[in-house]
Image (tube, grey):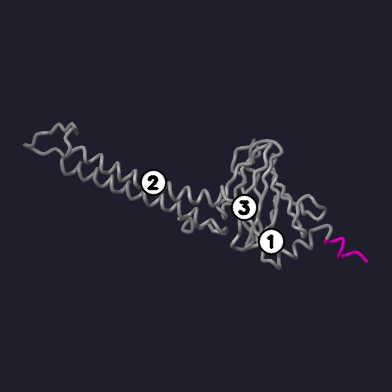
Amino acid sequence: MMEMLGLVAASSYAQHIDFVFNMIFWITAFWLLLAEFVFFYLILRFRKKAGVKGQYITGELASEKRWITIPHFAVLLFDVVILFFAVKVWYEVKQNLPQAADQQLVRVIGQQWAWTFVHAGPDGKLDTPDDIIKVNELHVQVDKLHIFQLESKDVLHDFSVPVFRLKQDVIPGRVITGWFTPTKTGEYDIQCAEICGIGHALMPARIVIETSDQHAAWMAENSTVAVASATAP
Ligand code: CUA
């Protein structure tokens, strides 16, 4: 469905989230169409006819109750299937925090009404002099695990990257840790997805997913320490 709607999937878990969405869509579509079909069939089949008296059906007979109990249990069974996959994907994206030797760190700070991204820089550590700080512009490397720390300076915001199928509330006073692994290069939208005041709609940003060469070049260009050492005599 998402791909049909033209929304690119650019993270390692995007397709898993789409799978749950699609599954729910098709299961509910199936039951909706079936119920409507039976509904209209019964209306037409038992409509008023000359010489036929109306029946008053109370639904107390076992043969009549089956029309409720069997679909009821079938729907419950599908609910269990949906729950199973929903919990599985939720665990993968939100509960689990993968680790990799070459993971990239980034701090994401929301405020009224902008995003600040603190990239760890060449040393891979936050809060060191080579950090690269950008407003409304996040640079990441394709196929690399990124660990983000979400912070807010004021109110609730929500860090949403539609191509990643990632959406996470930002809560003042808390540091929320999460992860993503981009799988496609390109430039995409970041949105704030939580009403955070009059400027909420003016709180978009961009994510640039680069190849390792492009990312290294961007780092060399932007890190003050790298620039200083490159220009030192
Ligand atoms: Cu920040 Cu809406």
Q: Which residue is mark 3?
A: 179
Q: Looking at the picture, tell me which residue is in the foreground, 89 or 35.
A: 89
Where the N terminus falls, by quadrant?
Answer: bottom left
Q: Which residue is mark 2?
A: 80
Q: Which residues are magenta?
A: 226-233
Viewer-nearest of labels 1 and 3?
Answer: 1
Q: Is residue 64 left or right of residue 30?
A: left
Q: Which residue is mark 1?
A: 102
Residue 229: image tag: none
Question: CA–CA distance between discs 3 and 2?
Answer: 28 Å
* Occupied quadrant, residue 140: bottom right
Residue positioned most to the bottom: 213
- Where in the figure is residue 50, as x and y percent of width and height? 8, 38
Q: Secondary structure at mark 2?
A: helix
Binning the other alpha carbons within 10 Å of mark 1 as few (below 14), some (14 to 19) or many (20 upward) gives few
Q: Mark 2 or mark 3, which is nearer the start of the sequence?
A: 2
Q: Is residue 222 left or right of residue 81?
A: right
Q: Is residue 138 magenta?
A: no
